[in-house]
Amino acid sequence: MVVPVILYGYPILRKQSFEVTKSDDIFQLSADLFDTVKKSKGIGLAAPQIGILKRAFVIDTSPFSSDQENTTPICEQIFINPEILEQSANKIYYEEGCLSIPGIFEEVQRPEKITVRYLDVELNQIEEELDGTKARIFQHEFDHLNGILFIDKLNPLKRKLLARKLNKIVNS
Ligand code: CO
């Protein structure tokens, strides 16, 4: 089901999410996240953004598939109880946006590569090394589970410059 994405300013986006357990309806959560991210033409969406304080998010890079330059395979996946085990010392800048913060896109610096552990939709535990856009989206969505937004990573001057735009979202 497509559900409204919660916008910047709502306290739920700043809360810590809880571990997913076997008693949670993972298929429903997965369906809601995928329906909503696709409808919103996003590339990632975390459960708290649809009002569910559970440690899960989806990555959906299918909007990139129309880009002829892009040869990396499409990722359409849910990540449950994700952990970041290791991160590369090398950090890179990459432009980020967020469905909860519409109209704002900024370069954010994060580790280039990460080693992660998570459960898939069938609760199989998976460990892998990520780089490229998948590593970037993973880190952005992972932050949502801890109440962190990408604008938190910007320098104070940049954030000051964004204050008016952010207030507009709060009051929309
Ligand atoms: Co986001």
Image (tube, grey):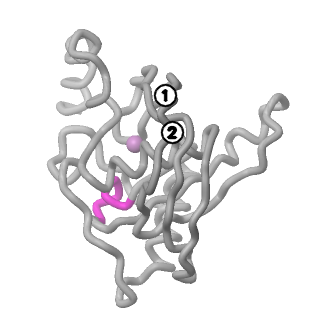
Q: Would you place residue 127 above or below residue 154 in this image?
A: below
Crowd rating for badge 1 (residues with CA inside 10 Å; few <14, some 14–19, many 20+):
few
Q: Is mark 2 within 8 Å of ligand 1?
A: no
Quarter for ligand 1?
top left
| Label 2 CA crowd tier, 10 Å (few <14, some 14–19, many 20+) | few
In the rendering, at what x and y percent does residue 29 appear? 44, 72
The residue under the point 21% across, 15% down is: 156
User: Residue drawn 30% across and 65% down?
Assistant: 52
Q: Residue type at mark 2? A: Ser
User: Which label belongs to residue 42?
Assistant: none
**Which range of residues does the magenta coloring cover?**
47-52
Task: Give the residue number, with chain letter if any, for mark 1.
Answer: 91
Cα gap from disc 1 to disc 2, whole angstroms: 7 Å
Residue 61 pos. (x, y %): 65, 47
Task: Give the amino acid type for the residue marked by disc 1 in the picture.
Answer: Lys
**Residue plotted at (44% across, 56% down):** 85
Q: Position of residue 90 (x, y in %)?
A: 51, 29
Pointers 1 and 2 in contact (CB under 8 A)? yes
| Quarter of the view holding residue 64 | top right
Residue receiving disc 2: 88
Q: Which of the pair 37/15 is nearer the observer?
A: 15
